Image (cartoon, rainbow, N blue to C red):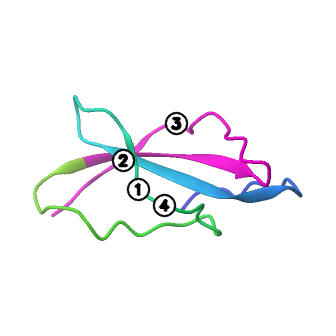
């Protein structure tokens, strides 16, 4: 969950994930239309790093957010 963007031309969000020492990959095929995402493809015992970007209706993408990380029990 992240703070929503309030721009009128917001199309949605891109969600990126990586493990330490790897390159971030986009998780969604289409822009996510709400400020939340549940990653169902995780492995127990790993730590993942996430960031998001906003995409407008013309396809322009913002810079990515600061990363947040989660360890999967």
Across and down, in percent, residue 51 comes to 48, 44
Confirm or deny contact between disc 3 and disc 4 (CB under 8 A). Answer: no
Badge 1 local density, few (<14 within 10 Å), some, or many (20+)? some
Compared to residue 60, the image places residue 13 above or below, namely below
Label 2 or label 1, whichever lies nearer to me, is: 1
26 displayed left or right of 33: left
- Residue range of the region highlighted in magenta in the rendering: 48-73
Q: Nearer the viewer, mark 1 or mark 3?
A: 1
- Can you name the residue that lies furthest to the left here? 45
Percent x, y for residue 59?
72, 47
62 relative position to 10: left or right:
left
Give the Cα separation between the discs numbered 3 and 4.
21 Å
At horizontal 20% and vertical 60% (from top left) the residue drawn is 72
Tell me which label, 2 or 3, sits earlier in the chain: 2
Which residue extends farthest top?
Answer: 21
Ranked by sequence position, the earlier of labels 2 and 1 is 2
User: Dot 1 corresponds to which residue?
Assistant: 27
Separation of residues labelled 1 and 3 (CA atoms) = 17 Å
Left or right of 70? Residue 21 is left
Confirm or deny contact between disc 2 and disc 3 (CB under 8 A): no
Which residue is the site of mark 3?
66
Q: Is residue 8 magenta?
A: no
Question: Dot 4: what SS?
Answer: loop
Query: In the depicted view, which residue is nearer to us: 58 or 69?
Result: 58
């Amino acid at each position: 969950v992240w703070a929503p963007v309030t721009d009128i031309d917001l199309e949605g969000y891109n969600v990126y994930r990586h493990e330490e020492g790897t390159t971030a990959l986009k998780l969604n095929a289409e822009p996510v239309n709400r400020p939340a995402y549940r990653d169902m493809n995780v492995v127990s015992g790993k730590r993942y790093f996430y960031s998001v970007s906003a995409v407008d209706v013309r396809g322009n993408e913002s810079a990515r957010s600061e990363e947040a990380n989660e360890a999967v029990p």
